[in-house]
Each structure stands twice: as structure tokens, then as C-alpha cells.
Amino acid sequence: MCNGCNRRQFLGSAAAGGALLAMNWATRSAMAATAEDWPPLPPVKILKVYAGRTGDYYLTRPTEELARFEQYFTDLEKKLGDIQFVGGDMIPPAKVEDVVAKAGDADAVFIVHLSGHGGDAPVLSKLVDAGMPTALFSQPFSGHGWMYFPQWHKQGKRVVLLPTSDWNEIGKVVALMRVPARMKQTKILAIGNPHGSEAACSAEKIKAKLGSELVIVPNEKIMERWKSIDPKAAEAEAESYWLSQAQRVMEPRRDEIIDSAKLFLAIKQIMIEENARAVCSVHCMGDPRGCLTFSKLNDMGFVGACEGDIDSTLTMLMFNYAFGVPGFITDPVIDTAKNAMVHFHCTSATKLDGPQGERRPFTIRNQTDSKGGVALQVENRVDQPVTCAKFVNLDTMLVCPGKIIETSTSPLACRTQFAQSVRDAKRLFLQWGQDVIQGDTMTLLHRVVFYGDHAGSLQTLGDLMGFKVIEEGGPV
């Protein structure tokens, strides 16, 4: 045990020089644990359609604007990197039925409304009703047909309407259009049975609603693989990603940290073999603990979720695909004196701005509740805008935006702690869950916090994917 020592003292007291010299080859093997080890996802295909005519007459878009749109979509492909626009027909002269038939394996539809009047909505409804996530961009002076488009929204169609002159809104929505496609391409591993809302615990319902595949893996398989990991590779992983980067190592022993790194290598191997991009586990409080494993997976741009929390797993996947940020699963409490929600847990990513961001300072600790295992105390950024959210029942996203107002290290809570401002703490307390969550303590309690204010974008994502968005503690 090395209470309160820094890394240099810890290494000096715990490691033999010969073992460190023998790690060179293993270090290269461990450092190769990158996102490139996973098979790449195919590009998201978006069918682009131009609706109406062009010209220099009343309530039409100029003909030369078509070339500008084509260049904009080309540039957007390069900027996002994983989008491919297909199609490009103009209706008319093309018939909407023919355009739908040619959609093929497109994942979404983007309609540019050029001109038209009241008859546009019935015609374009055939595109909207094709069942793909759809967006329609309609600038001012594009005709009077826009009056009929909101009917789709009222009918619950999976469509986003953009009545704006700001072309930047196109890019924002197209980036979100990747999410439903990516969810369909995603396999999730649950080590042991998943926990959460009833619908989310059903592999069949997840497949039907989101297209994702949920596969249950027995913990025995994980432990067998854990035992097979080369000790030198595990030591190199622990040294390169954790020990050499930590501000301090407090309670855990070196061998405990190596065992935790060994678990990461085991789960990583199985995820790659299964082509899975997310994992949750009800066995994360076992020996070794799963905290370091989930932290690094989240740092890499994948999802690792503790306590088998499938609702939070799905939430983290959506935010990951939409905004490129990892989530922090939290056991929140309410403080009306500070008009705040206080978040805490022992598992946290360190690259909270995303895989390309810098790591936040962290200390390697044990878990507060068990006084054992290996956990992380991560320093969060004060004044950072955040979004607290949870996708429940496969049909509702609970959201609570705010910013980090302070951090803390109370011995009464899990290791990573910070307080988030909220609109009305008393109302949040009284309306907790907004009467849409039922289940055990974990299901009712857990939320996930992400860097960035994404509340507005979640409304758009809800329109694309067909789920409700409710602000917890928001206006009645």
C-alpha cells in the first residue's frame, strides 16, 4: 500500500528495474490499443433531393444556386469524413415515386426546397413516409408550400424542418443524421444481464426501435480471457496509459492497477472479435473492477458503462455519434441551497472533450463505497457547459442543461465529483424522472453528463429518430 505517494515514489517502492527493462516489446503491443483496431464503420449515405424549380421569377431560388448547393454538399462530405451524399434528382421533372425507388440503401434523406406552393406537401410526403430520417431545408422566398410542412411534425413523422437562410444549419443537421444510421450498425455487449428500463433490457425491442444488436456475454468468458492476457502486456498498458499519466497514485497497489489494465485488454480483444462498439457490465464491482476499462474505452471513442446500465449505454452511444464526447455516469443528488445537481461516481473518462482532446488531470484511487479496487478521481473544468441526460424506455430523452459551478472531494461520495447548475433545483427534485422512469434504484437514479450544451440539438435528434425530449425540472 502506498498512501498519498506520488508516481515516482510509487514506482520506486513497487517495481523492480529488471521488470521495467523487460517491458519494451510489450509497451508497443499495449500502445497499439487504438480505435484503428476495430473494423471501420461504412459511410452514412444521405439521399439529396431538390424539390421545385429554379429561375429568376417570383418565389423561386436562382438557378446558379444549384451549383452552390452541390459544392456545399461536397465540402460537407470532406469536413465530416463519414458522410456520402447520393442522388441529386430534382422533383419535377423526376417523379417522387422514382426517387424513392432509387433510394436503395440510403440511410437518410435531405430535401432542398427550391420553390412551390400548397401542392408540395402531399408530393413530398411520399419521401417523408419512406421511413428514413428526413430533413427539409426551406429558405425564405422559396414559395408558400412551407405552411403545409409542419403537418408532418404534428403527425410525428421523423422529419426535421429548417425554415432558415443560414446554410450552417444544414451541416448541423447532417451531422446528427449519422446517429440513427450508426445505431443500426452498432453491436452492444452486456456482460451479464443488462439493467434499466424494461424496454431497453429487451434485445428484440432495441433491434426493432434502434437497429442495434444487444448480445449478452457471460462473465466467465471475460475472466477466462483475462487470465490469458500476457502479464507483460498488462504491465505495459498500466504503465503507459495510467501510471505514467496520473498526478498521484493513492490507495491501490501496483499489482491491482496492472490487473485492471489486464481486464481492459481482455474486454478490448472480445469487443474487436465481436465488432462491438459498446459494453456494459453488472460485474464491474468484481475483482478486478471495471473502472479503468470503461474509462479508456470512453477515451477512445467507444462506450463502457458500469453496473449494466443499458439506458445509459444507449445514451452514451447517441451522444458519442452525435457530438463526439464521452459520458460520465453519475449518482446525482440535489442541493437547493446552490440551485445545483451534484454528480459523483468512481468511473470517468479522462478525455472529456472527446478522443482528440487532452486528458483531464486525474488521481488513481480506490472506490469510496467499497474501499477497494481501482478507481479514478478526475478533475473537471469549472464553468464548462454540460448536458445531463438519459434515454429511457427507448422513447424518451430526459435532459437537464447547465454548467459546472464547482468540484469537490467529499469522502461521503464517489471519487469524481462536481456540481452542475440547474434551472430550478427544487422543481428538479420534485419532478425527478418526470414520471417516465420505473424500475430499481439504479434505473431511477443514474444520469449521464456530457461536456457541451446539447439540449437544442437533442430536440433535432428526437425529431430524426422519433423520440420525445423532456427537460427534467423544466417549465411545467
Image (spheres, rainbow, N blue to C red):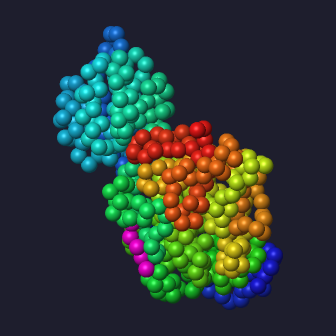
Let me know if residue 97 is in the magenta part. Answer: no
Decide whether residue 216 is among the magenta residues: yes
Instruction: Name the spot of residue 178 as percent of width and height, x first.
Output: 41, 48
Residue 270 on image: x %, y %: 43, 75
Q: Which residues are magenta?
A: 214-218
Residue placed at 22% from the left, 24% from the top? Answer: 92
For the residue pair 196 and 348, the one nearer the viewer reads as 196
Q: Count up the numbered dots.
A: 0
Which secondary structure is most common in the magenta stretch? strand
- The structure residue drawn at horizontal position 40% and vertical position 73%, both measured from the top left corner, is 216
- The answer to whether residue 122 is left or right of residue 414 is left
In the image, 427 versus 173, the foreground residue is 427
Q: Residue at x 49, y 40 (%)?
A: 459
Residue at 42 percent of width and 22 percent of height: 139
In which quadrant of the rendered image does the C terminus lie? top right
Q: Quadrant for residue 21, please give it.
A: bottom right
The N terminus, quarter of image: bottom right
Based on the displayed image, in which of its 4 quarters is residue 160 positioned? top left
Q: Is residue 110 visible?
A: no
Task: Give percent across and percent down for residue 448.
Answer: 58, 57
Could you tell me if residue 253 is visible in this image?
A: yes
